[in-house]
C-alpha cells in the first residue's frame, strides 16, 4: 500500500536525519577526524537518496486528484513531516559546511576544540546506513575534498525543497497532528518497535534507570528467597 | 568569543585540563572550576552528577551561539520532547509552558518533532555513555543560554557588565503614567501631512531642480573634478559680477533662494530701493545678524534696531501690525537673540507676498535673465595626451632655484 511505503521511507529518512544531526554535533570537537567526515558524507548521501525517493512517491500520490479526503489528510501530514525533515537536514548540512571549513583537519593553526567527546561515532553512522558496523579508513585529506561536494549537495537539497513546494501545494494550517502533547511518554515503552531487530538488542542494553531499579529489586528479592530457603534447610537438617 | 575558547584550549598556553572521573565514566579534558573566570562559565557546561569537584568541558562548536544560526523553534521543540521522554514528564515549569506553546504553534509538524526526538535519543545511545552525557550537557547549556528560564538574565541581550541597573519599579508610578498619557495625547494632536501631498511636493521639487543639479544634468563649462579647470567654481562664486543663467532662474523658484544668494539679495535690494520699501529688507538683515551674531553684541544690536526701525518716529520705520509691535516692544525690555523673531517673520511674509512677485515680473529681473551668461561646454580635446598635467600642488621635484620657492608656496598652501 502506498501509505505504508511512504511511512516506511519517511521513517528511514527521519532516522538518517537524526543520525546526521548527531554526527554534525561533533564536528570541530575533539572527536573530529577524517573518519567522521567520511561518515558524514555517507550518511548524507543515504539521506539524499531517501529524500528523493520519498519526495517522488509523495508527489505522485498528492498530485493524484482522485484521493479520498481522509487519505489526503493522511498524506498531507506525511508531506508536512517530510518537508520539515528536509529543512532540518538542510540546516544541519549548512552547519556542517561552515564548521568543516572553519576546522580543517590538517592545518594546526586552529586546533580542534577539546569538547570531552572522545569516542568514535561509527556506531551512529552504522545505524544511519542500517548496517551492522562500519569498517573503513578515510583518505588523508578527505575533508578538504569533500567541502565543495557538500556545497553542491546543499544547493541540490535547496532546489529539491523549492521544487516540491512548487509542485504540491499543502497549506500547513490545515494539517492536524495525530499525536497530542506528551504522547511521547506513552509510547516510549514501545520505542524499540520501529528499528531493525538486530539493533534493538543493543538499545535495551543501555536502558534507563527505572528498569534498572526494577531489575535490582527483582534480584534482591530472589536473593532473599534463596537465603530464606537456605535457613529453612539449615533449620530442618 | 570563539577565539577565546580556542585559545584557552591551546595545548601550550591554555588552561590546564585534566581527565575527571565521573562515577564510572571518564570524561577527558575537564577543567577544574576554580581555574576558569566566573564570567566564562555561561559558555561552558557543568556536569551535574560529579561528586566532589565540579568539572567543566569545552563546548562543541555546533552549539556556539552565533547570529548566523539563531536558535530555531523546531529545534527547541525537539529538545523539549527529548527531555520529556528522558525525564518521564518531569519538566521544569517554564519548560512545560514553552512546550504547550510550541505544541500549539507547531501543531502541524508535531509528528516530526516526536519522531525526531525519539530517533535522536536512539542515535545518541549508540555512543559511549561519557560522550552521551557530555553532549547532552552541552545541549542543555545551549538551550539555557538561548531560552533562559524566567528571571535569569538574558545574556545574549545584556552583556556581562550591564548587571547593575537601578530598581525600575520606581518608574512605573502614577506620575510616570500621567506623563506618558500627556505625551501620547500631544502626539495625537500633531499636524500630519498626507503622504500624497508630501510626495507631490517632492516630485515637483525634483522636477523643477533636476536641470540645476550638477550630477543629474551635468555642469557647464566642465566638471572641475574631471577636467581640472576651475571655471565652474569661478563662474558660480558667491559674489560675481554676472551670474549664470541657471542661478538667475533659481531665484524664481522661491523667496528663500533669492535671499540666500548674495547676488540675488543685492539685486532685490536695488529693486526695493526703486519701490521705496528697502527698509523691510534692511530690517530683516539686521534681525538675521542679531540671531546669528555674538552674544555680547545682542543688547547693543537690539537697541540700534529699535532706534532705527521700530521707534515711533524712526528714520526707517517698518510697517508691522499692532499686535506684533506690542509684543516686540514688551520683549525689548529683556533682550535676547530671538526677541525680534515675530517681527522678522511678519516682514518676511510681507516681502514674500508683496515685493517678491513684483520683482519677478519686473523689467529688472527680465534684463538680468537676458544678461546672464551660459558658459559653453569645453570641447573635448582630440588628442588626449596633450591635456594639462594634473597636479594638485606644485611638484617639489623642480629645479633647485625654483624648487625652493615652489616648496615655500606649497608649504603655505598646505
Image (spheres, coloured by chain):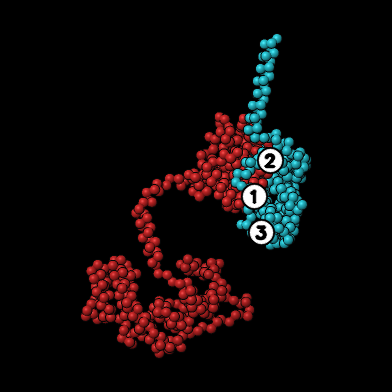
Q: Secondary structure at mark 1?
A: loop
Q: Quadrant of the C terminus of chain A?
A: top right
**Which residue shows up at 28% across the image and 80% down it?**
B319
Q: Secondary structure at mark 3?
A: loop
Using the image as rendered, state which of residue B369 and residue B310 is in the foreground: B310
Residue under label 1, please give it: A178
Which of the chains is cyan?
A
Which of the 4 image quadrants contains residue B257? bottom left
Above or below for B219 versus B122: below
What is the spatial separation of the Cα atoms under label 2 and label 3, in whole angstroms?
A: 30 Å
Marks 1, 3: nearer the viewer: 1
Q: Earlier in the sequence, mark 2 or mark 3?
A: 3
Question: Which disc number belongs to residue A170?
Answer: 3
Is residue B173 left or right of A133 when viewed as pictured?
A: left
Residue under disc 2 on the same chain as residue under disc 1: yes
Q: Chain of mark 3?
A: A
What is the spatial separation of the Cα atoms under label 1 and label 3, in whole angstroms?
A: 17 Å
Amino acid at each position: 500500500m502506498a501509505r505504508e511505503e511512504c511511512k516506511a521511507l519517511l521513517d528511514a529518512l527521519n532516522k538518517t536525519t537524526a543520525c546526521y544531526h548527531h554526527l554534525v554535533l561533533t564536528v570541530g570537537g575533539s572527536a573530529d577526524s577524517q573518519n567522521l567526515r567520511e561518515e558524514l558524507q555517507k550518511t548524507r548521501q543515504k539521506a539524499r537518496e531517501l529524500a528523493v525517493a520519498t519526495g517522488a512517491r509523495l508527489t505522485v500520490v498528492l498530485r493524484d486528484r482522485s484521493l479520498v479526503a481522509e487519505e489526503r489528510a493522511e498524506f498531507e501530514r506525511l508531506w508536512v513531516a517530510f518537508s520539515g525533515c528536509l529543512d532540518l537536514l538542510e540546516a544541519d548540512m549548512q552547519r556542517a559546511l561552515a564548521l568543516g571549513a572553519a576546522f580543517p583537519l590538517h592545518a594546526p593553526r586552529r586546533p580542534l576544540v577539546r569538547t570531552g567527546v572522545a569516542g568514535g561515532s561509527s556506531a551512529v553512522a552504522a545505524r544511519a546506513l542500517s548496517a551492522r558496523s562500519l569498517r573503513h579508513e578515510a583518505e588523508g585529506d578527505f575533508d578538504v575534498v569533500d567541502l565543495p561536494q557538500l556545497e553542491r549537495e546543499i544547493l541540490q537539497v535547496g532546489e529539491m525543497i523549492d521544487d516540491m513546494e512548487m509542485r504540491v501545494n499543502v497549506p500547513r494550517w490545515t494539517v492536524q497532528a495525530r499525536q497530542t502533547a506528551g504522547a511521547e511518554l506513552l509510547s516510549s515503552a514501545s520505542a524499540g518497535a520501529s528499528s531493525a531487530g538486530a539493533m534493538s538488542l543493543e538499545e535495551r542494553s543501555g536502558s534507563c534507570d527505572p528498569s534498572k531499579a526494577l531489575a535490582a529489586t527483582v534480584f534482591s528479592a530472589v536473593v532473599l528467597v534463596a537465603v530464606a530457603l537456605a535457613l529453612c534447610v539449615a533449620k530442618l537438617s | 568569543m570563539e577565539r577565546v575558547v580556542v585559545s584557552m584550549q591551546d595545548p601550550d598556553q591554555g588552561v590546564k585540563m585534566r581527565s575527571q572521573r565521573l562515577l564510572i565514566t571518564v570524561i577527558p579534558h575537564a577543567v577544574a572550576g576554580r581555574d576558569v573566570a566566573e564570567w566564562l562559565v555561561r559558555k561552558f557546561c557543568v556536569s551535574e552528577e560529579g561528586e566532589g569537584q565540579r568539572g567543566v568541558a569545552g563546548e562543541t562548536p555546533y552549539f556556539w551561539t552565533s547570529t548566523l544560526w539563531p536558535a530555531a523553534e523546531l529545534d527547541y521543540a525537539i529538545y523539549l520532547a527529548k527531555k520529556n521522554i528522558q525525564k518521564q514528564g518531569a519538566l521544569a515549569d517554564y519548560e512545560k509552558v514553552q512546550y504547550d506553546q510550541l505544541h500549539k504553534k507547531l501543531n502541524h509538524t508535531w509528528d516530526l518533532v516526536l519522531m525526531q526526538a525519539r530517533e535522536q535519543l536512539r542515535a545518541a545511545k549508540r555512543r559511549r555513555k561519557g560522550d552521551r552525557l557530555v553532549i547532552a550537557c552541552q545541549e542543555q547549556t545551549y538551550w539555557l543560554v538561548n531560552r533562559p528560564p524566567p528571571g535569569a538574565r538574558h545574556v545574549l541581550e545584556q552583556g556581562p557588565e550591564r548587571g547593575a541597573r537601578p530598581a525600575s519599579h520606581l518608574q512605573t508610578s502614577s506620575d510616570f503614567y500621567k506623563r506618558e498619557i500627556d505625551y501620547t495625547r500631544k502626539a495625537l494632536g500633531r499636524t500630519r501631512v498626507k503622504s500624497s501631498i508630501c510626495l507631490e511636493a517632492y516630485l515637483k521639487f525634483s522636477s523643477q531642480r533636476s536641470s540645476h543639479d550638477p550630477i543629474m544634468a551635468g555642469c557647464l563649462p566642465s566638471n572641475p573634478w574631471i577636467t581640472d579647470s576651475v571655471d565652474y567654481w569661478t563662474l558660480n562664486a558667491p559674489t560675481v559680477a554676472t551670474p549664470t543663467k541657471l542661478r538667475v532662474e533659481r531665484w524664481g523658484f522661491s523667496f528663500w533662494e533669492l535671499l540666500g544668494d548674495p547676488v540675488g539679495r543685492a539685486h532685490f535690494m536695488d529693486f526695493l530701493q526703486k519701490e521705496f520699501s528697502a527698509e523691510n529688507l534692511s530690517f530683516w538683515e539686521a534681525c538675521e545678524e542679531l540671531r546669528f551674531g555674538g552674544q555680547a553684541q545682542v543688547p547693543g544690536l537690539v537697541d540700534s534696531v529699535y532706534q532705527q526701525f521700530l521707534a515711533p518716529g524712526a528714520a526707517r520705520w517698518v510697517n508691522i501690525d499692532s499686535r506684533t509691535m506690542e509684543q516686540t516692544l514688551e520683549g525689548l525690555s529683556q533682550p535676547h537673540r530671538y526677541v525680534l523673531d515675530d517681527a522678522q517673520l511678519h516682514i518676511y511674509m510681507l516681502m514674500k507676498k508683496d515685493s517678491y512677485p513684483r520683482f519677478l515680473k519686473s523689467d529688472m529681473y527680465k534684463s538680468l535673465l537676458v544678461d546672464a551668461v551660459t558658459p559653453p561646454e569645453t570641447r573635448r580635446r582630440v588628442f588626449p595626451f596633450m591635456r594639462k598635467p594634473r597636479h594638485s600642488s606644485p611638484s617639489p621635484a623642480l629645479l633647485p632655484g625654483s624648487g625652493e620657492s615652489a616648496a615655500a608656496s606649497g608649504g603655505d598652501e598646505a
